Amino acid sequence: MIGRHRHLIGLEELDRGEILQVLQLATSMKEVLRRPLKKVPTLRGKAVVNLFFEASTRTRSSFETAAKILSADALNWTAAGSSVSKGETLVDTARNLEAMRPDVLVIRHAASGAPRLVAERVGCAVVNAGDGAHEHPSQGLLDAFTLAEHFTRAAGGPEAAPDFGLLAGKTVAIVGDVSHSRVARSALHCLPKLGAKVRVCGPPTMIPAGIERMGAEVHHALPEAVKGADAVMMLRIQHERIGDPLIPGTREYSKFWGLNARKAAEWLAPGACILHPGPINRGVELAPEVADGPRSVILDQVQNGVAVRMAILYLLAGGGEAHV
Ligand code: CP
């Protein structure tokens, strides 16, 4: 259980204490990742099924890696090559895989609400690995973990013990296609609960109406959005969720909302870090020299994704006593 919850569908329903429960356990899990022998028996005998109806590199492989480090068995199912092509429904697919007795189903689906629908119809725990433009809760948690790690490092604290209290009062600017971003939505449900302020910035057609009600400060000009921010999260344009074009073209987009080395040097605070959930469209929202530069914590996000997903699987698979 994560606090009161037997599933992880979104960060909207998690309170501050429940978010901290996962983040603090992820700190112990990250210590396992630093060991030469990255294997603990914590979830021996448990099984995790990754049910991915949409493409993924980071999320699917890190849930699989997390399960294996904890000694759980991991099965990777993808829609391509499955009986979905013969007309099998989401719920039938999930219930048939559940009949094989997994402890956790990790689901990614293009439809917002798909993981909740499955959670209402199966007996095992369900984790939302990204549903449409709704939420991507494990990404929201790994982003919070990465930010705390960065702020701890910047304050001269021990990297191995991120201080989540340091998120309080910090400003995070999220830039790009916020309308179609489940990553942005999960960040907006997570970071303010940890005391951080969130700004969103992008073309007016990519900022949802009423997002201020989620606590976001809205900007349309990049210089003012990133000015004084402690962290900047760049997002790609979610072409797969966009029907009619929302911008004149990627060149204009890059000019006004993309970040390159010159803009970063001129506009960002000296210690501000740069995040991106991936995949990056290099040269569009983020120039390669920034993605790979000293401010970037993008690969920290990927590594922390394993630790955070270990914590999520542990809590939802009922790992019992922590042998980490
Ligand atoms: N951040 C993220 O969800 O990446 P993938 O689509 O590769 O899983």
Image (cartoon, grey):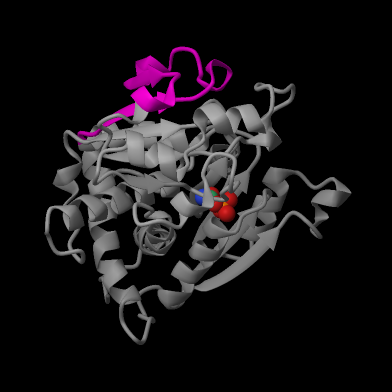
Measured as percent of width and height from the top left, residue 69 is found at 42, 76
Q: Viewer-proximal residue, 194 or 118?
A: 194
Residue lying at 34% horizontally and 61% vertically, measured from the top left: 311
Is residue 211 one of those drawn in magenta?
yes
Q: Quadrant of the C terminus?
A: bottom left
- Residue depicted at x 81% and y 60%: 81
Task: Write down the region rendered in magenta.
Answer: 195-224
Q: Is residue 234 left or right of residue 248?
A: left
Q: What is the quadrant of residue 272 in the picture?
A: top left
Q: Quadrant of residue 226?
A: top left
| Magenta-colored stretch includes residue 279 | no
Q: Position of residue 181 (x, y in %)?
A: 53, 34
| Left or right relative to 59: residue 172 | left
Q: Residue furthest right?
A: 86
Q: What percent of the width, then of the height, locates residue 183?
A: 47, 39
**Residue closest to the far top:** 210
Which residue is painted at 39% across and 18% down in the image?
A: 218
Q: Position of residue 129 (x, y in %)?
A: 53, 49
Question: In this view of the protein, which residue sits in the foreground, 150 or 88?
Answer: 150
Q: Quadrant of residue 34?
A: bottom left
The residue that appears at 32% across and 53% down in the rendered structure is: 146
Nearer-the-camera pick, 56 or 287: 287
Residue 10 visible from this viewpoint: no
**Relative to residue 20, is residue 52 drawn left or right?**
right
Question: Vertically, is 289 above or below 33?
Answer: above
**Can residue 257 be seen?**
yes
Q: How many marks?
A: 0
